[in-house]
Every structure is written in C-alpha cells, then in structure tokens.
Amino acid sequence: MLTRRSAGLLVAPAVILTVGVFVAPFLLLLAMSIWSQPPGSLILDPTPTMENYVRIAGDGYYIRGLLRTLWLSLSTTAIAALLALPLSWWIVLRAGRFRGLMLTLVLIPMVCGALLPTLGLMNLLGPLGVINGTLKSLGLIDRSWKMLGNQTGILIGLVHAFLPLMVLPLVSALDRLPADVESAAMSLGANRRKVWRRVILPLAAPGLIAGSALVFCAALTSFVTPLILGQGKVATFATMAYQQASLVLDWPFASALAVVMLVILALIGAGAWGAQRWAADTP
C-alpha cells in the first residue's frame, strides 16, 4: 500500500517537469511583457511598465491583426463544426469495421505535424497546383484562382489541420448515444431534420463545445500555417509575435503579444467550461 510520502515521490518528477517546462516559462513571459528595451539596444530594462500593452492597444496595425486572427479562428471553428458533425455521426453509426481506418485518416494531419500538410496544400492551392490545373483542364476557369497569400488559403489550411480536434470530441460524445436513438425518434414522428435539431445536437453539445474550444485556441495560436500559406502577406497575431522576437529582437513586446493571446485562450477555456456545465445540466 502506498504511503503519502511514496505517492508524493512518484508524482514529484511530473510536477517538477510541469513547473520547469510550462509554469516557469509562462511566468517569465508574463514578467518580460512588462519590461522594456531601449531603441537600438538589446539590453532589457526590468523596470515594470505597461508601455508594451499601450503600444498594442494604440496601434491600428496590431488591432487589425488581432481582429483578423479572431475572424480566422471563428471561421475555422464554424467550418470545422459543419464538416465534423456529419462525419462524426457517420463514423459512429455507419462506418462499422472501417471505423478505425476512418479515425486514422482523420488523425493523419495531426500526426504529420503542421509543416508537411501545409507544404502539400501549397501544391494543391498554388496557381499551377492541382486544383487550378484540374479546373483549367475541364474548362471551368480561364485564369488561376488565387488561394495563396490571402485569408482563403490560410482558412483552408487551418480547417485541414485542426478538423481532428473537432471530430474526436464529437465521436466521443456521439459514441455514448444508443445506436437506435435515430430510429426511435423517427418512429415517434420526427423527420431527419427534427432528429438532428431536437435529439442529436443537444446530446452532442458537450463534444461540440469541447471541439470548438480546441479548434479556436489552436487556430488562434497557429504559426506555421498562416506563415507559409499567407506567404508573409497576411499578418496574424502569432506571426507578429514571431517577427518581433526573431527579426526585430524586441522580446518584451513579443512577450506582450503572446500574453494577449494567453489571456484570450484563458477566456475561451473558462467560457467552454461554463458552457459544458450548462449543457450537462440542461435536460
């Protein structure tokens, strides 16, 4: 039988790792965000100041970047939800023995990381890519659609990258439903639209809320996909932070940009937790 001391020793490595890898960097990031850096110097001044946050709030470039990032995140979440709901329902009730294969195919974009799928999308979405080439060969378009270097390409890339984060919670939620719930509702006079609106969606709400929070947060902080598919022409908050840290070498201001994203993530997490509690308590 484990004593309290032995249990503490077992947990200690995980606690030390969590504090050293996650908590300490976040605290340093928060502290650095209220530091300053004199122009033309790489020496940091640890005197507390809110100058970095005032700069963010007072510069239209960063406000537009934040609004653009929020818009892309919301759009990614909405499109992912529309695609994931029927796909998850089909995987749970119709896939049968191919369920494992379908889940594997859904997970491939996440397993491969962000770089490889994004580079593959460049070959698909480029002016001489597969999509434009196919449409031209079929005579459907005369000139190439521009899908790189704008928000369209970024949105496609974000949906492709983070769709699994919506599918998996929905599959988990729908998997708990009785297999004959659809037939039972239709036997009581409900058509398919009412079944989805009155039965499936309310019961899948916890998974939908969790998936929406995951997709939104992932899209908000995504860096590789907007940088590559946007081709440096579409500034998001994550790419702005990267430019300030790696190119301008203004670490305090980059830290302030990152803290703004962390605050938004915390608000989204708290909102998702509250919405899940409400959905679980709603009959």
Image (cartoon, rainbow, N blue to C red):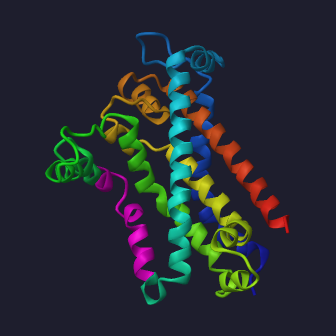
Up-down relation of residue 167 to residue 100 (above or below):
above
- Foreground residue among 58 and 174: 174
- Foreground residue among 116 and 147: 147
Quarter of the figure that contains the C terminus: bottom right
| Residue 78 painted magenta | no
- Left or right, 179 with respect to 72, comes to right
Whether residue 220 is visible here, answered yes or no, is: no
Residue 231: quadrant of the picture = top left
> Where residue 36 sits in the image (x, y, percent)?
56, 17
- Foreground residue among 275 and 191: 191
Residue plotted at (68% across, 50% down) = 269
> Where residue 112 sits in the image (x, y, percent)?
34, 62
- Foreground residue among 281 and 59: 281
Up-down relation of residue 275 to residue 260 (above or below):
below
Quarter of the figure that contains the N terminus: bottom right
Magenta segment: 100-118
Residue 261: quadrant of the picture = top right
Residue plotted at (67% across, 74% down) = 191
> Where residue 175 sits in the image (x, y, percent)?
62, 79
Whether residue 223 is visible here, answered yes or no, is: yes
Residue plotted at (55% across, 34% down) = 258
- Left or right, 213 with respect to 155, comes to right
Up-down relation of residue 156 to residue 249 (above or below):
below
What type of secondary structure mainly makes up the magenta span? helix
| Residue 105 painted magenta | yes
- Left or right, 271 with respect to 82, comes to right
> Where residue 222 sits in the image (x, y, percent)?
46, 44
Residue farthest left in this picture: 137
